[in-house]
Amino acid sequence: MMKQRSPWFSDARQWFEKRRLGLFLHWGLYAIEGCHEQQQWRYHVDRNQYQKLIKKWNPTRFDPDAWLDIAERAGMEYLCFTTKHHDGFCLWDTKLTSFNTMNSAYGKDILAMLAEACHRRHMPLCLYYSVVDWHQPNYPNQGRHHELPAQSEDDPNWNQYVACLKGQVHELCTNYGEIHGFWWDMNVPEAVDHSVNAIIRKHQPAAVINNRGFDQGDFSTPERDFDNDANRCAFTRPTEACQSVGSESWGYRERENYFTDRYLMQRIDHYLARGANYLLNIGPHADGTIGDIERGMLERIGAWYRGTRESFVDVEFAVRLTSNQEVLLTRRGNVVYVHLDNDPISSGVKLPPIDVMPTRATLLNDGRPVTCEVSLLPSEHLTGKPCLWLRGLPTNELANTALVIKLEFETLPETLPDTLGITTRADDCDTQVDREIHADDTRLR
Ligand code: GLC
């Protein structure tokens, strides 16, 4: 019998395994000029000049329910929100710096508004927090990656900075109700300090913590597809891939280079089918609204996800059922899902050595039946073995999406290769992802 992978978590963090697609929201002062969330660093903006943006921060059209309507329509199952990005501007009522939303033209606690709506609508909320800080004078900015050059008015003092950071973590974990995750950014590998995540663990037992903070946390964070196509193995550690809707920025960018629907759906499929979560990012406008382009993309991705979701949740990774390495397979009992996470080059998919017909085959994208045969294909004459062949797939008609096919079998013969949820290359896969994230931070975009 197929062996079940044991759950990642056996406590309140289990929500993370059921809710697989999340919406990342990068929002802060940088939305005002609509350039890049690291505008200050990438374009050498004078610090004092940048800080003046606080006077212009007045998102009068911010309505957390409107965000949640969009998120829910897109099938998003949790949110991750930037409480403080590298610029140091805090979107909550923090007592530890005046550089926060309460002192802006807007003057309201944005996180409180968002958290209230999320709690009311049972939408898990995770908090992004940047360790790098371009405003707090104790942060030792030294011009390293994602850091500003040192300035004479700075007062670099790492211990004092961490004390302040811990105070802020405490505020975030005690003033806003239940928090489902903490998303550190900019790992400082030399700064291992378990007492930081301990604050989160103490106050927020449901919170999953990522690996870019003061220890390895709960999950890995391959970003922007650094984990490339070559990896066709399952993850053995909780993992959440993240990507933005455009290639240039995470914050709102007026002239963004948006990804195609197909690209995003294929990449989402590529990670979800291998057991990772996926966090898709948008940058709301400075007035608080979400742009039409982003909304449209999310709606189309949501429609796709609603159709295909059953192929990702409570399934085993089952790629070893077939020698066809162009597809990924997931499986729940006698139901097998075929994921076309790469561009299909024809209208057919063969799945040797499977040689039994399913009782039903359905294209999850739109529910239409899929034609199947078990036959000896000319291209298989050397093996001389008939195999299951899905043919006549609408690969041209649905070229702008990722196809997922559901195959329901009476039984799958025991003689099929081992269908452990994990391939033999799984360890390589995880090691590679972590190496990519930690080794070369200059690649973080
Ligand atoms: C990178 C970027 C940062 C962004 C983050 C999201 O670390 O440098 O700006 O917030 O990715 O994953």
Image (tube, helix red, strand yellow):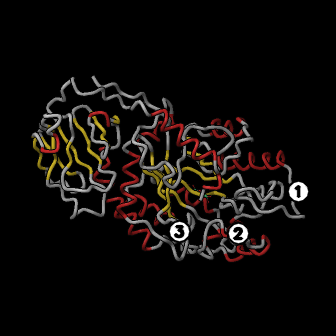
Report the disc number at residue 284.
Answer: 3
Q: Is mark 1 within 8 Å of ligand 1?
A: no
Looking at the image, can residue 336 be seen? yes
* Percent position of residue 410, x then y: 14, 32
Dividing the picture into quadrants, the one containing residue 403 is bottom left
Residue type marked 2: Gln
> Which part of the image, by quadrant, shows the N terminus?
top left
> Which part of the image, by quadrant, shows the C terminus?
bottom right
Classify 10 Å Cα crowding around label 2: few (below 14), some (14-19), many (20 and above).
Answer: many
* Percent position of residue 365, x then y: 24, 55
Asked whether the residues under the numbered discs 3 and 2 touch, taking CB atoms below 8 Å apart as contact, a structural biologist would say: no
Asked whether the residues under the numbered discs 1 and 3 touch, taking CB atoms below 8 Å apart as contact, a structural biologist would say: no
Q: CA distance from mark 3 to mark 2?
A: 18 Å
Viewer-nearest of labels 3 and 2?
2
Q: Earlier in the sequence, mark 3 or mark 2?
A: 2
Residue type marked 3: Pro
Q: In the rendered view, tell whether residue 301 sits above or below residue 427.
A: below
Q: In the rendered view, tell whether residue 215 sits above or below residue 151.
A: above
Task: Name which residue lies at 54% across and 60% down.
Answer: 25
Viewer-nearest of labels 1 and 3?
1
Q: Which residue is mark 1?
A: 155
Q: Nearer the viewer, residue 198 or 261?
A: 261
